[in-house]
Amino acid sequence: MSSVSSGMIGRSTGDRIVLALTIGMAIVMMAPIAWVVALSLKDNKELMTDMNSVFHAPYTIQNYINILATSSVFRWILNSVIVSGVLTILTLVLSSLAGYGFARLNFPFRNALFVLVLLGLAVPEQAVLIARHQLFSWLKFHNTYHGLILPGLAAPFGVFLMTQYFRAIPRELDEAALLDNASRFKIFWKVLLPLTLPAQATLGIFTFLSSWNDYFWPLISGTKKEMYTLTIGIASTQTNFAQSEGLGFLMSQAVFAGAPILILYLFFQKYIVTAVSGAAVR
């Protein structure tokens, strides 16, 4: 009994240490976010006088009102929603179809093509930037929605993720469906695809997050104000002295741009946890 009780005490102590370390790490990670939110709720002139004023009232939402007062901000939000939403949906469709094909179908050069797709992970975006810009200029795709969406459809990570999930599903399900005279597409759509929901949710979140926060390509392709995404539009409202004369306004822009991603993650976090734990088990 003494050995059992001592083991329980030791395990309890270890759990407390792990919990304390987890809480400490969470505080360290949340501190910058709390600091940004607090700065966004302070008057810019007050911050210029005394930075310590962030720790006490009064607070204000005037910085957020100033953002909403920008006439084009809702157009920028709409552009980001359209680009990120369409890109996410198309990436899920293409990655799921490609993943099913690589995992379940036999066709010539399958392995070679899969390796070619994976090589896309090693190619940085900057390496193809000039060629892409020239191609899109020739096609007159700049300052259009499809010009902002198409480059993101090359998603080798999505193909790899969906391929691995389809491979982990027992083939007996396919065989049983084939015995019931189900077509390949029906097996994909009705039987296998619902089982990959955690992977799709994870891929969708990361794709939407990457597209929403993308700054590099929209800065190059969307040069007209009405085609700005939210990241480009907000950046265009900053003055040369934003860090010193408008720190509160600058931080409110960061919160405003990041809030939709946080809300999206809160809605789909259970799918992300399921996908990550499932990948760990595999």
Image (cartoon, rainbow, N blue to C red):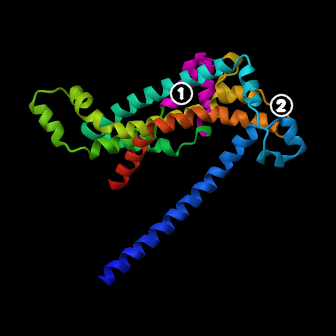
Instruction: Residue type at mark 1: give it.
Output: Ser
Q: Tell me, for residue 239, which label it has, or none.
A: 2
Identity of the residue drawn at 41% across and 47% down:
273
Amino acid type assigned to the residue bearing label 2 in the image: Thr
Q: Position of residue 248 (x, y in %)?
A: 78, 37
Mark number for residue 84? 1
Main SS of the magenta part reads helix
224 displayed left or right of 128: right
**Would residue 142 be counted in the magenta stretch?**
yes
Residue name at image x 34 percent, y 49 percent:
278
How many other residues sit within 10 Å of disc 2, few (<14), some (14-19) or many (≥20)? few
Q: Position of residue 24 (x, y in %)?
A: 59, 60
Kindly indicate the quadrant of the structure image that contains residue 142.
top right
Where residue 28 sits, quadrant-wise, is: bottom right
Element type at marker 2?
loop
**Residue 59: within the magenta?**
no
Would residue 116 be seen by someone viewing this image from the given angle? no
Provide the residue span drawn in magenta: 127-153
